[in-house]
């Protein structure tokens, strides 16, 4: 049995006072009082939440103070997966729940590579939402119509989303670094009536105009009736077809009070997209009620977010973490928005932002933490970071050595919560808990209400063994369905074919002796030398600790009737992949993982292809190495990198 090593002393644990004061404990008290129980501790609460889903989600609604008409029924067809219906009689509006709170409270902060704007109060945000909602209504936009955004992570994007949601229309977004084909592959499927777009954006100190790209996008979307151009770099519409200036539109809009259309719990809120690396992206439809309730649970209970705290997540509008971040408004938080490079003008910029904005919860990617470590920056020596009580990490597995770096060199007294889920559920399967300790290399817990297990190839639950991450019972943030999938065949095929009636997420995972979770990589990227499944993250966890290696990517290459492991490495400047370096890499992998993990071939490359959200894409490289064309290059942030892997002489023998 190949198990993950664990340590017997946690890296961090909450104080008894913090546990007692947490929202999680208050929620457990509510459940105990309401149902005459004496639940104690996270494991007991989680077990109750999955055995009693109707009572659990009813309690979440009440505890988080959802604004709306709940109705009498909480869950029907609970055994259907998919097909269960949560709150079938409820009526609510997503925007109404996000815009609650005191008008004078700060709603949004914005930082663009160190340049900041004045804070936006909740009153000012509500005013702008009301104005753009009036614009949308004057354009004939109504329930179910699509509003698309081609925007940076800035306040105007949130205004556009909330205005869209307030009238029952459906919002969908891409970030402005997407190419024309990538945008049209997404928005072309959903036929938006309105496009909100920036005239350009800034990245790594450069101003990148979007006018030419927008002209092609607008021409390629015949469904568009109106375009609103946000003058992010000061150019404005500049003659673009059907386009008007955002600032002028809002200035001319009436100052009427904002009204909210209350709609069914399952009414569509967002259309989001799969990465598209294996073909045209899937259009995933998420509901207003499911998104709201799941995010309130995650922010209020798992993140212990309290009104007035400041929440940050480094994300673009093309990644689900943007949608997740924005929901922090419903918990009463101030959102600290950031757009641009996390390393410009230096690797200090986000740590500067933590101190200047007094960020309480700081969200980032595992790759960012590793990059800071390799940069030599020691944030605890250069910054105060006294406001920061929690660090969130996602996007790829956070390796044990990165846990060490956070506690040694960033902040000792901080809850480090690795989280994992996906666009498919616009939320998390596994994440943090404010009443549990942090163990090295482990995600703390299964989400409340999420019946997460790890199954072997035969569909049997396993502990301390690697297998498929599954969810065996319904939850509210399951997709409404896929766009243009009237009989639901594509939706069922995506998640429910491997194990009928069970959500199979496609992560190769393990449940530890502590009840924590380790993600070993994507199931479709696992390696199978000699028929033994190996997660790619297990290899990366070893090789990327070598200071000479900047980044790595592993694939399985079909070879002589078997599969051999091939490792590609990007070396740091001034270092070469010579024989001695190859030996160091192999020795490190053999000692830290196992002899089966040791690659048959190690090849130096100049770049690694990645998706728009920064995730490396093993599948695209595997296709190129095997002489297959990548179906959708536009899904990649750097498709030119694929050429580096074609016809490599090193892999011909």
Image (tube, grey):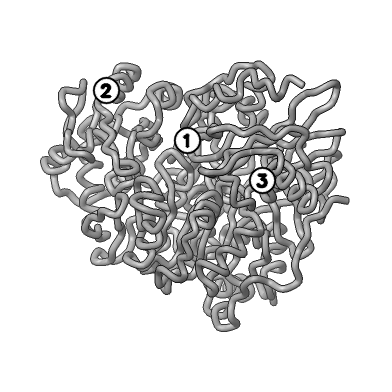
Q: Classify 10 Å Cα crowding around label 3: few (below 14), some (14-19), many (20 and above).
A: many
In the image, residue 570 above or below residue 78 = above
Reading the image, the residue beneath label 1 is 612
Kindly identify the residue that appears in the image at 77 percent across and 21 percent down: 653
Q: In the image, which disc is placed on residue 212?
A: 2
Circle 2: element type: helix
> Looking at this view, is 276 or 601 the one in front?
601
Give the distance between the C-alpha atoms of the residues marked 1 and 3, in whole angstroms.
20 Å
Q: Which badge, 2 or 3, comes first in the chain's sequence?
A: 2
Q: Which badge, 1 or 3, comes first in the chain's sequence?
A: 3
Reading the image, the residue beneath label 3 is 540
Q: Is residue 219 left or right of residue 572?
A: left
Residue 237 in which image quadrant: top left
In the image, residue 103 above or below residue 520 = below
Circle 3: element type: helix
Q: Classify 10 Å Cα crowding around label 1: few (below 14), some (14-19), many (20 and above).
A: many
Q: Is residue 626 left or right of residue 640?
A: right
Q: x%, y% of residue 595? A: 83, 45
């Amino acid at each position: 049995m190949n198990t993950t090593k664990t340590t017997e002393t946690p890296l961090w644990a909450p104080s008894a006072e913090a546990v007692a004061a947490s929202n999680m404990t208050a929620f457990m008290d509510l459940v105990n009082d309401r149902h005459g129980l004496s639940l104690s501790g996270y494991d007991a609460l989680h077990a109750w939440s999955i055995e009693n889903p109707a009572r659990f989600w009813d309690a979440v609604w009440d505890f988080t103070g959802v604004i709306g008409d709940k109705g009498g029924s909480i869950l029907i067809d609970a055994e259907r997966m998919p097909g269960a219906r949560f709150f079938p009689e409820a009526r609510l509006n997503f925007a109404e729940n996000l815009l609650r709170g005191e008008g004078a409270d700060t709603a949004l902060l914005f930082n663009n590579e160190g340049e900041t704007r004045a804070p936006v109060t909740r009153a000012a945000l509500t005013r702008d939402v009301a104005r753009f909602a009036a614009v949308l209504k004057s354009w004939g936009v109504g329930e179910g119509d699509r509003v698309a955004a081609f925007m940076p992570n800035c306040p105007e994007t949130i205004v556009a989303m909330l205005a869209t949601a307030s009238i029952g229309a459906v919002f969908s977004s891409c970030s402005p670094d997407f190419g024309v084909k990538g945008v049209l592959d997404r928005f072309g499927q959903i036929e938006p009536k309105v496009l909100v777009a920036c005239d350009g954006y800034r990245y790594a100190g450069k101003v990148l105009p979007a006018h030419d790209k927008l002209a092609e996008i607008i021409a390629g979307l015949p469904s568009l009736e109106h375009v609103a151009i946000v003058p992010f770099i000061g150019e404005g519409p500049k003659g673009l077809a059907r386009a008007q200036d955002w600032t002028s539109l809002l200035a001319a809009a009436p100052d009427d009070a904002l009204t909210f259309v209350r709609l069914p719990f399952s009414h569509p809120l967002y259309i989001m997209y799969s990465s598209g690396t294996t073909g045209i992206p899937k259009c995933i439809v998420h509901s207003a009620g499911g998104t709201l309730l799941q995010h309130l649970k995650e922010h209020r209970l798992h993140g212990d977010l309290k009104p007035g705290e400041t929440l940050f997540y480094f994300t673009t509008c093309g990644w689900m973490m943007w949608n997740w971040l924005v929901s922090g408004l419903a918990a009463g938080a101030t959102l600290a928005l950031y757009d641009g490079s996390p390393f410009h003008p230096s690797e200090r910029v986000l740590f500067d932002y933590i101190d200047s904005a007094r960020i309480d919860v700081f969200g980032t990617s595992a790759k960012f933490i590793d990059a800071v470590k390799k940069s030599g920056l020691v944030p605890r020596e250069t910054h105060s970071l006294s406001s920061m009580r929690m660090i969130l990490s996602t996007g790829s597995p956070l390796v044990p050595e990165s846990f060490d770096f956070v506690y040694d060199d960033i902040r000792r007294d901080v809850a480090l919560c690795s989280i994992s889920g996906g666009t498919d559920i616009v939320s998390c399967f596994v994440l943090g808990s404010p009443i549990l300790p942090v163990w090295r290399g482990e995600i703390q817990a299964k989400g409340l209400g999420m019946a997460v297990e790890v199954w072997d190839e035969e569909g049997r639950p396993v502990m301390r063994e690697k297998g498929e991450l599954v969810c065996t019972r319904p939850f509210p943030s399951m997709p409404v369905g896929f766009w243009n999938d009237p009989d639901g065949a594509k939706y069922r095929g995506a998640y429910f074919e491997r194990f009928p009636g069970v959500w199979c997420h496609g992560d190769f995972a393990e449940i530890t002796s502590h009840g924590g979770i380790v993600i070993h990589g994507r199931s479709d990227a696992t390696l199978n030398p000699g028929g033994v499944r190996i997660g790619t993250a297990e290899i990366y966890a070893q090789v990327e600790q070598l200071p000479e290696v900047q980044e790595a990517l592993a694939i399985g290459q079909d070879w002589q009737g078997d599969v051999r492991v091939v490792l590609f490495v990007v070396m740091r400047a001034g270092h070469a992949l010579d024989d001695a370096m190859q030996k160091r890499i192999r020795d490190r992998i053999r000692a830290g993982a196992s002899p089966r993990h040791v690659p048959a071939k190690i090849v130096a490359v100049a770049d690694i292809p990645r998706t728009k959200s920064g995730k490396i894409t093993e599948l695209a490289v595997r296709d190129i190495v095997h002489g297959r064309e990548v179906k959708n290059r536009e899904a990649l942030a750097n498709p030119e990198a694929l050429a580096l892997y074609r016809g490599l002489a090193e892999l011909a023998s």
